[in-house]
Image (cartoon, coloured by chain):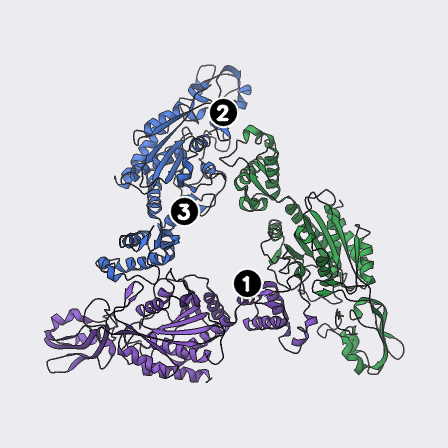
Chain colours: A purple, B blue, C green
Amino acid sequence: MAPVTTQGEEMYALVERLYPLCRSITGDGVRATLDIVGEYIPLDVHEVPTGTQVLDWTVPQEWNIRDAYIADTAGNRVVDFAASSLHVLGYSVPVAATMPLSELRPHLHTLPDRPSWVPYRTSYYKPEWGFCLAQDTLDAMPDGEYEVRIDSTLADGHLTYAEHVVPGQVADEVIVSCHVCHPALANDNMAGVAVATFLARALAEETPYYTYRFIFAPGTIGAITWLARNAERVDRVKHGLVLACAGDPGQLTYKRSRRGDAEIDRVLQYVLTVSERPHQVNEFTPYGYDERQYCSPGFNLGVGSLTRTPYAGYPEYHTSADNLDFVSPEAMADTLAVCREAFAVLDRNRQYVNLSPYGEPQLGRRGLYDALGGRSDTKQAQMAMLWVLSLSDGEHDLLEVAERSGLPFDTVAGAADALHEAGLVKT
Amino acid sequence: MAPVTTQGEEMYALVERLYPLCRSITGDGVRATLDIVGEYIPLDVHEVPTGTQVLDWTVPQEWNIRDAYIADTAGNRVVDFAASSLHVLGYSVPVAATMPLSELRPHLHTLPDRPSWVPYRTSYYKPEWGFCLAQDTLDAMPDGEYEVRIDSTLADGHLTYAEHVVPGQVADEVIVSCHVCHPALANDNMAGVAVATFLARALAEETPYYTYRFIFAPGTIGAITWLARNAERVDRVKHGLVLACAGDPGQLTYKRSRRGDAEIDRVLQYVLTVSERPHQVNEFTPYGYDERQYCSPGFNLGVGSLTRTPYAGYPEYHTSADNLDFVSPEAMADTLAVCREAFAVLDRNRQYVNLSPYGEPQLGRRGLYDALGGRSDTKQAQMAMLWVLSLSDGEHDLLEVAERSGLPFDTVAGAADALHEAGLVKT
Amino acid sequence: MAPVTTQGEEMYALVERLYPLCRSITGDGVRATLDIVGEYIPLDVHEVPTGTQVLDWTVPQEWNIRDAYIADTAGNRVVDFAASSLHVLGYSVPVAATMPLSELRPHLHTLPDRPSWVPYRTSYYKPEWGFCLAQDTLDAMPDGEYEVRIDSTLADGHLTYAEHVVPGQVADEVIVSCHVCHPALANDNMAGVAVATFLARALAEETPYYTYRFIFAPGTIGAITWLARNAERVDRVKHGLVLACAGDPGQLTYKRSRRGDAEIDRVLQYVLTVSERPHQVNEFTPYGYDERQYCSPGFNLGVGSLTRTPYAGYPEYHTSADNLDFVSPEAMADTLAVCREAFAVLDRNRQYVNLSPYGEPQLGRRGLYDALGGRSDTKQAQMAMLWVLSLSDGEHDLLEVAERSGLPFDTVAGAADALHEAGLVKT
């Protein structure tokens, strides 16, 4: 695989391509996004018709938009969708009218505290139209008449999401989910999409233990749709990670699953700790990204969420300042690296049963001392074997062996492999 | 209801009336006490005959006293029961004799370290007579003959206790218990009696969820008698509080039930913490007030004890210095306020079950966002609904939701009510 | 029993006798060691033939040695087994040859960092011969020819271990195990052997509750042999302690059993804490002394390990500097004292069941207040009775009563005895 810096740059290049597209929870922007991702990894794209009942929800009408602007009497576009897809309130119904500024005002969304930034706003489930613009722009608009036009369609169609599967040795699945519904926001969530894409490629380099399923879906309704259509599969989902905000300059943040002590929680905690990266681990809250759905009490999956600065935790969040300058190749490469380290542990983590549990088995007789004698980590490897034997009672996994022994997980897993080959432990 | 300061003064006035009566574990002093309390709240008074077997104990003979004194040869009463009911050893057998001071001395109880204070002493189960007096008084008594007289009766009769019930919506009960056996001691426990009385009145203002039973009984033998006569009812007692030492200037102290994590323990811990009152929470010990009986291992009820300065924790404890100057309207009002806050939480605290546990239910469709839109705490209310939905799996109650979310309990309970009305949760 | 200082000196005198013997995992040195210990306490000596299958291991050939040396061409013994049994690599096969230093070197073991110390080395399971010597000695050896001779025998024979039993009131056993396989090392483990010996004598002074079994066996293979031959008995072993490194100047160290919260772990933690000795309590690791075997997951016995400075924790470890100067009568007396304190607690620690669990039983009626009235610890004794009654529900033992009440264990155990005599509790 390419060196890390190159990967960071490749991911950044992908974000650059995806960034300008006008995404929403349905529509052609999502399809265009998935087309581009599909150039990197093969995708299985699903189209779910408007009106489909999905759990407690119904798939809404599909929204598409061609053009939108506010023009002054001279015909100058003061606010123009062509400049940024953020300028239109998501799911705006069509409008074509001329009206005085006073009448237009209730439809204009700004950030008075950040006068040069454009906010991101939507109204998915209440028919509404509106524009998002900089407070500075609004302040510069003289009273008078304005031509207002939103050339959008809200009609029966489909909700679109995609899956990519990296087949593993077992049918048990790990899901990696990221939302693809936000328009021109770089960190939230094209960075997450890019990291997920390159993570999928990395995992495919050798057959992993688990089957890894990547889900690219609109937030909330997309995850709900996936869960509704995969009721049978959910039992096979053993672990999962929601990836978002993967490229900002902040430190890594892991948010635990609702279970709080799921294996994925322990793995992320471990990897972040031993890697000595600055990081934070937060308890589950029922707010944030699609872990809300995966961890709803009926499913209660072992799904955590990995971000850099978490949901709504930075001023640029849901504004035009979450742009291509806000994310970096280095940050995305770091997020990808942590994902790979975590899945490397998760994938090898098992509970073993010591088949010779009465007293220590004589390792020397089996060449388990000699065999390792020439290696510089001989002593650690021997200690790791003793630890694995001691804790292989069907109640502790290798991660716990690593934690309690203070030995590197790789050494512990290697010791387990050696003991397994010698017939001293079984899974 | 009357403002807090007025309530404090009303409670103080009640203490003033109760204070001088000569109470013991049986006798007319207890009856007179209950008569006065009965002017505030209706009481169900029980008379249990001497000799009745109650658990491991037997109801003792009833003790009454009319007069008692030590007089010098000139006929001056050096120690006089009429001045304070503390002057006679509780349960003193009658005596009428003249004897030299040297013979009298073994019957005299003083506090050499607090020479101006009169101690409180009893001998319920061993026939004995005696006087309690200030060391200063004793020091001033010249050698010589003294007339000693205790005009008491120890005879078959009854043990007296009373109950007051505030009916609730369910038969499950909360008991509030306070001892009524101490003579002229203000904090221990006429302040507790007064707070319990006004708490009962406050609870009756609207029908509470639980049925609240107030028990006014002599310490130890009274609680044991109540438990013995209510074997059937005990299963219905879900929570309880022993109220004592409710009026001194010290900070509030909650002593956990023997269970340590009973709901009442969690509620008091929570209320004391969020109210930001200085306070202390102590672990259970098998010594103190009648929580000893309610929490004996056979019953093991979820009954804690609320005091200000705890049992035996102040120098005035069990002395004449525990008088009307030692308690204040403000302290009693504060104790009452904490009780009301705690029972307000306890009364609304429930475990709910999310009826739409697969993914989040669509709250907007049910008007649960709009309905709350106009309120200033909208965002908190919405977060509270998500938290209640997330934790409503039959394993967490609203108090835990409040603790984990950091949201006010009232907001959480209101969210649960809204979800309940919308049919999204059930109890 | 003799005063502590005398005991310390007696133990030291025993160490002095045992120290010079050439012990290994088999052979006459072990037998001589057990003969001397047998002068203090009667021993049941077991001889297990070479080739016997013991768990995953096989009893090896027996090793004996009569003489060994390296002599220069002038016949001077540069290295002489007669000077110290450490000089020969344990289990050296016989050799008689003359060779240049260059050829001899690979068979010489030194400690370059501690040039005046002789290391302790063995090769039990791989046929090898060698000498251990000071680096200084090696440095002074000129090139040239040397006569090398090891007059040893490696032949079918026996593995020798011994047991001493102090009969108790019940068949449930406590084992105390110490290894007897190290040659001239004082702290590791003749000090442990001496403390175990005197502990056995002390326990025999009165019939203890448990049956105490002392095991004197070679490390690893000895414990494995004992476990293999006592499969039936193992179920009766309720607690145990591996004693080693009992005489060095360091502070006491207790290493928990694999269970981590076995009763022996709680007892040692308690005794070390309340005695206010400087000490350390370590978590279990699957490395160290024979707790490795007793705590292997199949047996998982409640066996901890008591040392002063732990296994491999001091520079003198496994060198000639672990000599008679390194251990002291005071340190051994202190280790013995802790063992006696711990077993005094363990032996009286029980779970009781309160036979009068509904309310408090009336202690006064049974003379339990009066009976104790004359003692200076009356108040503590009464509190202890209330605590024992409160926690006697079959889920807490007396040690937990002591910990939670803050009362001395002896007071608690005395209260339990009094309540037991009064028929208020049963075991």
Q: Position of residue B293 (x, y in %)?
A: 47, 36
Q: Position of residue B187 (x, y in %)?
A: 39, 35
Can you tell which mark lies on residue B338? none
Alpha carbons under labels 2 and 1: distance apart: 73 Å
Do marks 2 and 1 share a subunit?
no
Location of residue B40 with respect to B335 vertically, above or below: above
Label pair 3/1, CB-CB below 8 angstroms: no
Alpha carbons under labels 3 and 2: distance apart: 51 Å
Q: Depth-wise, is mark 3 or mark 2 nearer the camera? A: 3
Q: Which residue is mark 1?
A: A396
Determine which quarter of the picture holds residue C312.
bottom right
Q: Which residue is mark 3?
A: B263
Residue C247 in view in this figure: no
- Amino acid type shown at disc 3: Glu
- Amino acid type shown at disc 2: Leu
- Amino acid type shown at disc 1: His
Q: Depth-wise, is mark 2 or mark 1 nearer the camera? A: 1
Q: Secondary structure at mark 3?
A: helix
Chain under disc 3: B
Q: Which residue is mark 2?
A: B138
Chain under disc 1: A
Residue in view at x 23 percent, y 69 percent = A123
Tell me if mark 3 has few (under 14), some (14-19) or many (20+) residues whose alpha carbon lies within 10 angstroms of its own.
Answer: many
- Give the position of the N terminus of chain B as an image quadrant: top left
Location of residue A39 with respect to A221 vertically, above or below: below
Residue B195 in view in this figure: yes
Determine which quarter of the picture holds residue A8.
bottom left
